[in-house]
Structures are given as structure tokens and as C-alpha cells.
Amino acid sequence: MSGNRLSRIVTRTGDGGNTGLSDGSRVAKDSARITVIGSVDELNSHLGVLLAGKLPQQIRDLLLSIQNDLFDLGGALSFPQGGHFAQDKLARLDAAIAQHNAGLPPLREFILPGGTPAAAQCHVARTVARRAERDLATLAHLETAPESALPYLNRLSDLLFILCRVLNRAAGHTEAQWQRQDPTPD
């Protein structure tokens, strides 16, 4: 691709508290649509932090693919009538879930977020994916949203949870399990 996609970064058009969508319309920066676009962008940034560290190549490739999906999702969300977000992206997540979960032992208890730095960062990305999913559900109640976007974010948070476990196991790190704390009587 040649040419500049973004010739100006500072436009000053948002100084009044609104921003432009892909169709040229303007909406408030705190609208449900902009909120979910921001959550998807934040999720993508957390994946970027995860990718800045040492990862197995297969997981690195998967996360880079997901980052591209999230850019596509942000673009689809920027259309008020609901842009196109391909269903095949969801099928890729389902395949990755099956592949990476197959080698994990079953969970007998909840696990605490953490472990290695990579797994801990993956847990942060997982929680941001859940927030993005909630934000998208809010948007879908109010306006049009891409049809396969909600299932995609739901599966993505599941996949990220599985990847947290995979990353900890690959590093030989034992997962910390939740220990019920009995309340102390007053």
C-alpha cells in the first residue's frame, strides 16, 4: 500500500467532546460506540505489551493475528450501521481454544491471576477482553453492532485464559489456586 493513511494526527475536531465515525457522522466521546471502540483498542494495547516479552512463536503468531482481528473489529464498530466483521475469525479462535486446551489438565479449583510475567499480562488482557465484551453488549442493546463481534470477544477471553495456563506450564510455573478464606467472627 502506498501513500499516507493518516496525514494529520492532530485535527482539533474532537476538542469539544465529540469524535467522527467512519461514515462522517459525529458522536459524543462517551457514547456506547466509542466506549467499546476504546475498550477494544485498550485490549489490543495489552496484547502489544504481552507481545513485547518472550513468548513461544506459535503463541506470538496467534496473538499477532488477534491484534489484526481487533483492528478489524474497531473498524467495523466505527460504522454506525454495524460494519462487517468476518465470521471466520470466530472459527479460528475456536480452533485455537481446542488446540491449546487439549494439553492442559482439568481445573479442580479456580486459579488466581498471575504466575510468570507473560501469564500475568495475559490475565490482564483477559479481563480487558471481558470488559470489551460487556461494553459491546451495552452497545448491541442500544444500536447496531457487528453480528459476530460479541461471540468473538467472548471466545477471545476464554482463549486468553487458556493461554495464561499454557504460558505458566511452558515456564514450569505452578498455578496458584484460590483458597477459600473463612470469615473470622467479630
Image (cartoon, grey):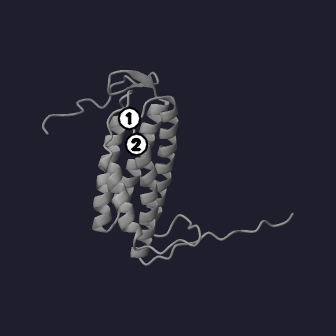
Q: Is residue 68 above or below residue 3?
A: below
Please identify, in this view, whether the residue under mark 2 or under mark 1 is nearer the observer: 2
In the structure shown, which secondary structural element does the residue marked by tag 1 occupy?
A: helix
Report the residue at 14% width, 39% height from top. Answer: 1
Q: How many marks?
A: 2
- Tell me the kind of residue under disc 2: Ala
In the image, 140 versus 157, the foreground residue is: 140
Outermost residue toward the right? 186
Report the residue marked by disc 2.
149
Mark 2 crowdedness (10 Å alpha carbons): few <14, some 14-19, many ≥20: many
Report the residue at 33% width, 66% height from top. Answer: 55
Report the residue at 46% width, 57% height from top. Answer: 158
Alpha-carbon span between mark 2 and mark 1? 9 Å
Q: Is residue 69 above or below residue 7?
A: below
In the image, 132 versus 6, the foreground residue is: 132
- Tell me the kind of residue under disc 1: Leu
Residue 99 seen in the current view: yes
In the structure shown, which secondary structural element does the residue marked by tag 2 occupy?
A: helix
Q: Are marks 2 and 1 in contact (CB under 8 Å)?
A: yes
How far across and down, in percent of the image, does residue 167 sit? 41, 69
In the image, 2 versus 94, the foreground residue is: 94
How far across and down, in percent of the image, does residue 101 sit? 41, 68
Q: Which label was assigned to residue 77?
A: 1
How far across and down, in percent of the image, does residue 22 sit? 32, 27
Q: Is residue 96 above or below residue 102?
A: above
Report the residue at 35% width, 66% height from top. Answer: 99
How far across and down, in percent of the image, does residue 131 sit? 51, 46
The image quadrant that residue 104 belongs to is bottom left
The image quadrant that residue 51 belongs to is bottom left
Which tag, 2 or 1, sits closer to the chain's start?
1
Residue 52 seen in the current view: no
Mark 1 crowdedness (10 Å alpha carbons): few <14, some 14-19, many ≥20: many
